Amino acid sequence: MIQKILDGIKLSWAENRKVTINLSEASTLTGSGLDIGGRTFFDDTFTKQRFINPFRQGSRILPAPNNSAVQFVAKTGNATNPTNPWGYSVAPNTGDPDVATVYWQMPVRLIAAQLPIRTAALDDINALGVELVSDLYAEFSEQEALSMARNNDQSGSATDSTGATEGLRGLDYYPSGEVAAYGSSGPAMTDGLHDLATVALESSPPTYDTITALATGLPAAYWGLPGTAWYITPAFIQTLRQLKDTAGLPLFLELGEPGEGGALGSIFGWPVIPNPYMSEDFPVYLANWPRFLTIADVAEMSVQMMEETAPGFMTLYAEKRVCSTVRDPFAGVRLSA
């Protein structure tokens, strides 16, 4: 302490000015100074990294502001004469099948969250308010992804955590079939349940032929379209990475494709996108996602701070409205485990 005073006197004499000497720290301050006068630096708050909804990477995103439902219409059948379409004769509605449409309607669903916040915490913790809002957005993304994959919107008993009858129509609960087909038409909740082409997993671990059957199950018309990709659960990706041939080499080792970062960056030329929200029942989807799945966002996420809901506390209320549907059932195929 004496040395600090002497240094201050020397500096004042040398620069001919008033010098303030800080005597708050003891002369024994060494190292970090913890618990003996050292100061604490407060870093900005942060949250863990969340896996943002992978379905949004490739699916068709439809803005539908201020609507309570979204209707989808598809043309089916053929307009050309199946006997002989050539020439100038007119024979309307003679296709095989005849020209027709199918339609269904999906209600908009609401995700909501209420978060109590101690008023003093917003002042004391750096960047807390911004981080809370951004993490809530990411949490909503997780919840919508789980509902898009696993929710049963036809029943309120088995899938309450993903919304049940108040949630989205999950891919798991579309009926399986050897070939794809449109569901029934109408505005009822039982309409639009399309049959999805499904390949059964006949052995565990899967065989190379099973993955080949999946690739073959996607109609060739979708093979070359932008957005065609595999969505696979991380656990099943690891299973495929461990498949080896008789020489002990990985079956799905993709070489010479930049930016892949290792085996299984793609399969048969289509990129592999990990999706942890899909279930073990259907761990693999191959689809042209812009045609296969449509997500309709009614509005951006709404946030409102409600003050003094309890002494010393505020409540952050947030909501997001969305709906999703399989739009073209022929544009995808899946693996049933």
Image: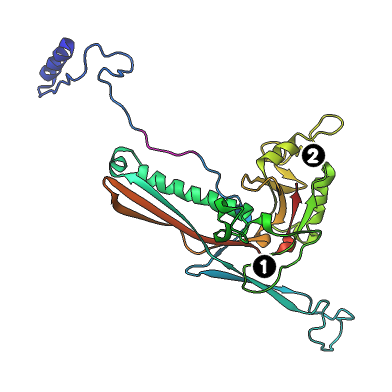
- Pointer 1: what residue? 192
The part of the chain drawn in magenta is 43-48
Disc 1 element? loop
Magenta segment's dominant SS is loop
Answer with mark 2 or mark 1, whichever residue precedes in sequence.
Answer: 1
Amino acid type at mark 1: Gly
Q: Amino acid at mark 2?
A: Ser
Q: Is residue 232 left or right of residue 82?
A: left
| Residue 46 in view (yes/no) | yes
Q: How many marks?
A: 2
Circle 2 is placed at which residue position?
204
Label 1 neighbourhood size at 10 Å, few (<14), some (14-19), many (20+)?
Answer: many
Asked if the residue at tag 1 contacts the one at tag 2, i.e. Cβ–Cβ closer than 8 Å, the answer is no
Q: Position of residue 124 (x, y in %)?
A: 29, 38
Question: How far apart, in angstroms, are the residues tagged by discs 2 and 1?
Answer: 33 Å
- When asked about the image quadrant of residue 13, the answer is top left
Q: Quadrant of residue 192?
A: bottom right
- Give whichever of 5, 11 is nearer the camera: 5
Classify 10 Å Cα crowding around label 2: few (below 14), some (14-19), many (20 and above): few
Q: Position of residue 312 (x, y in %)?
A: 27, 45
